[in-house]
Amino acid sequence: MPDVDVVIVNYKSASHTVKCVAALHAAARQDGVSVEVHVVNNGDARAEFETEVHHAGEAKVTTNSENLGFAAASNVGARAGTAPFILFLNPDALVHLGALQALTSFLSDTRNGQVGIVGPEVCNSNGATVPSCSRLPSRFDLITRSMGLHALLHKKASYPYAPLDDHAHSRAVGQVMGAALMIRRSLYEQLGGFDERFFLYYEDVDISARAKAVGAESYYLKDACVTHVGRISSSQDAGFSLALHVRSRLTYAGLHFGRLYQLFLLLVCTVIEFPARLLQAMLGKSAVGARGVLRAYKLLALNIFSDTALPKPRAQTQTQY
């Protein structure tokens, strides 16, 4: 049995997936950690994709007939393994030497038995640490994020990500970034895996919240590091990605804070967030252009009122807490 099952979901990011697999095997050999790599192909129809992955290193490749979304595809990969730990890794993430050993040793230490999820330090392509952990969002946090006030309150609120000063040392946190998230298989199975009602975004927040509800902590481990390029898949259609992000925020609100709060948050997103984002885009202060913002909220409206335009969330059969 391997020490770690590594699940990588590929969506139109083949070249990054190949580099990710190669770096992962190099780190595993150096660290003396045995890994079984599961690549779930969620949207690359090129015939040579699987061959390229195998050239990078040993891996089991599963090709879905359609794009299932990140949560569902991650569950496909995780179910194919048996290792005690599962590392969910974005295709544009490169594992540094020592990271696998640090992560597995930490979870194997009986003194850390209360920790169920651990995330490494995340660096950008320039080697600088980027925010990758935070506390779990409150009702107030989701409102301020929708109103655009989270940037003003960031240092005090530590949401959506904690300040960089808080990334200087290892510590217990509310959640870690899903770009590189290791979880005990026993906890993953207890929780029923990722909630497949999240097509993309917030599935990492949700699983951390559900882990906390059953007494398992999330932990940021400074001693392990990965490089994460970021926004490789989502940047290919910024408007579509923004629509999914807002929908997932609303889904999280409904699951964790109730239907009434979800409806209130939807009102805030419509009346305040939409015009604010559009104004930012028109002033050139947004990564998503004005056309992208208009497209995002059109897709969101169509999805809300006619259940079209966006991928339908898959049914969730896991037991809710």
Image (cartoon, helix red, strand yellow):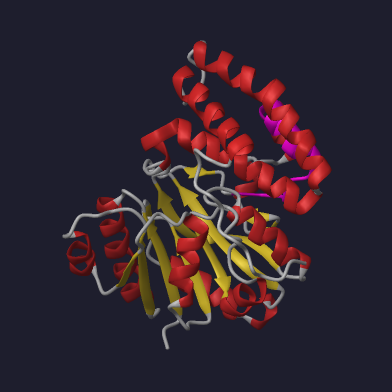
The answer to whether residue 124 is above or below residue 181 is above
Return the residue found at the far front.
Answer: 306
Which quarter of the image is occupied by the N terminus? bottom left
Which quarter of the image is occupied by the C terminus? bottom right
Picture coordinates of residue 147 (x, y %)?
Answer: 71, 26
Is residue 55 rendered magenta in the image? no
**Residue at left 67%, top 47%?**
251
Return the residue found at the far bottom.
Answer: 1
Q: Is residue 20 left or right of residue 181?
A: left
Count of numbered badges drawn on the protein = 0
Is residue 145 rendered magenta in the image? yes
The answer to whether residue 282 is above or below residue 216 is above
Return the residue found at the far right.
Answer: 260
> Magenta span covers which residues?
133-151
Q: Nearer the viewer, residue 247 or 217?
A: 247
Answer whether residue 148 is visible to the viewer in this image: no
Answer whether residue 143 is visible to the viewer in this image: yes
**Residue at left 63%, top 35%?**
305
Q: Nearer the viewer, residue 251 or 180?
A: 251
**Residue at left 47%, top 30%?**
239
Q: Which of the 4 image quadrants contains residue 45?
A: bottom left
**Residue at left 52%, top 32%?**
299
The answer to whether residue 239 is above or below residue 23 is above
Picture coordinates of residue 39 (x, y %)?
Answer: 35, 66
Q: Nearer the viewer, residue 205 or 241?
A: 241
Picture coordinates of residue 214 (x, y %)?
Answer: 76, 71
Picture coordinates of residue 193 (x, y %)?
Answer: 59, 69
